[in-house]
Image (cartoon, rainbow, N blue to C red):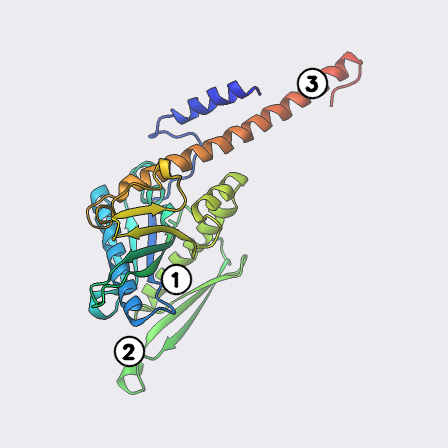
């Protein structure tokens, strides 16, 4: 296919109605789980404290962004540190009516390490400190996304005592472990004293793991798309730096002239400016995905052309067609 034809086709695909995207566009995922973790290992006392404070600020930044989009932001876990910081947190985000408005399309590029550079309020010497927090965004699967056949699951139940003995043993958590026999994947939930709630949570977690695997391996398109999301494939990769001394944000995955720089750190973290960065990621991902789709369609057309040409030659030679 001539290059000009490719460009015309790509332009046509790019102008497709967002409310009715072509089948080759990324699938809509209505719910995601976002996990924040303070990445203060090996840092000074000030660094550990600052990392926990920054983790809390990121947590609140995504909560604010979710509210602005009209999503439901349901806090699941918050482990607080000293001074109001957060060591670990997770939240379930849902909402939207299509791929354009659903959380996954907006938040999937946020997985990775977010780094902050500033003078901590706890450092009396006024020294610049670099700290970081890790963010992971995972799709949450519905029953229709991942179905289990009879005999696919093995469920194991055990008691996890909440104390040394006596009454506390009677109030033990009913730990539930669910194993997906075809793949060997397993998850365990101990968050509730209710066996039913732990079982429900464990099965949901297993669906999420299986959906994440399906998105990763469904096709050559989606494998490349997941690589775009993860960068090098390591969720510990540094993806963005927030420098409050210079009041700027640098996104290390975007060109500087295409959203990688020029954003105010205080605006992004505290005043709802995150959307401006995410718009660039959505556009870059959309165009990259469309380019791969066009190349695949081009290859398919070329293959059909080769087969048609071979059939034509065989007919000209009075040989039966394949």
Labelled pair 1, 2 in contact (Cβ < 8 Å): no
Residue at the image point whose x is 29% and y is 52% from the top: 243
Nearest to the observer: residue 148 or residue 256: 256
Where residue 42 appears, as percent x and y from the top left, is: 38, 69
Quadrant of image for the N terminus: top right
Of helix, strand and loop, which one carries label 1?
helix
Nearest to the observer: residue 177 or residue 211: 211
Local crowd size for mark 3, using a 10 Å CA cut-off: few (<14), some (14–19), many (≥20): few
Q: Quadrant of residue 60?
A: bottom left
Quadrant of image for the C terminus: top right
Q: Is residue 262 visible?
A: yes
Labelled pair 3, 1 in contact (Cβ < 8 Å): no
* Image side of residue 303 versus residue 114, left or right: right
Q: Is residue 147 visible?
A: no
- Residue 83's place in the image compared with 286, above or below, is below
Q: Of discs 3 and 2, which sits in the foreground? A: 3
Of helix, strand and loop, which one carries label 2?
loop
Where residue 310 appears, as percent x and y from the top left, is: 72, 20
Mark 3–mark 1 distance (CA, rounded to whole Å): 55 Å
Residue at the spot of label 1: 202
Residue at the spot of label 2: 171
- Of the two numbered discs 3 and 1 on the same chain, state the one appearing first in sequence: 1
- Of the two numbered discs 3 and 2 on the same chain, state the one appearing first in sequence: 2
Residue at the image point whose x is 23% and y is 70% from the top: 82
Local crowd size for mark 1, using a 10 Å CA cut-off: few (<14), some (14–19), many (≥20): many
Residue at the spot of label 3: 309
Residue at the image point whose x is 32% and y is 36% from the top: 100
* Image side of residue 315 versus residue 78, left or right: right
Mark 3–mark 2 distance (CA, rounded to whole Å): 75 Å
């Amino acid at each position: 296919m001539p290059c000009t034809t490719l460009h015309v086709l790509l332009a046509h695909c790019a102008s497709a109605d967002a409310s009715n995207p072509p089948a080759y566009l990324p699938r809509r995922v209505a719910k995601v789980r976002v996990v924040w973790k303070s990445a203060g290992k090996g840092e000074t006392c000030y660094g550990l404290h600052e990392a926990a404070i920054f983790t809390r600020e990121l947590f609140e930044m995504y909560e604010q962004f979710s509210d602005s989009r009209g999503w439901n932001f349901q806090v699941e876990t918050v482990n607080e540190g000293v001074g109001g910081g957060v060591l670990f947190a997770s939240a379930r985000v849902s909402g939207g009516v299509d791929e354009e408005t659903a959380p996954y399309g907006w938040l999937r590029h946020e997985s990775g390490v977010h780094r902050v550079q500033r003078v901590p309020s706890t450092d009396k010497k006024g020294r610049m400190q670099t700290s970081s927090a890790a963010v992971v965004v995972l799709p949450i699967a519905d029953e229709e996304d991942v179905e289990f056949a009879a005999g696919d699951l093995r469920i194991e139940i055990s008691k996890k005592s909440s104390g040394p003995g006596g009454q506390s043993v009677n109030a033990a958590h009913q730990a539930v472990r669910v194993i997906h026999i075809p793949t060997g994947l397993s998850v365990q939930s101990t968050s509730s004293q209710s066996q039913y709630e732990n079982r429900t949570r464990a099965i949901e977690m297993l669906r999420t793991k299986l959906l994440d695997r399906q998105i990763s391996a469904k096709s050559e398109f989606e494998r490349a798309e997941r690589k775009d999301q993860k960068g090098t494939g390591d969720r510990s990769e540094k993806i963005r730096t927030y420098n409050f001394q210079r009041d700027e944000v640098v996104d290390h995955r975007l060109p500087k002239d295409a959203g990688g720089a020029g954003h105010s750190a205080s605006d992004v973290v505290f005043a709802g400016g995150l959307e401006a960065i995410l718009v660039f990621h959505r556009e870059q991902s959309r165009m990259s995905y469309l380019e791969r789709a066009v190349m695949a369609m081009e290859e398919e057309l070329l293959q059909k052309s080769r087969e048609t040409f071979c059939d034509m030659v065989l007919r000209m030679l009075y040989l039966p067609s394949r």
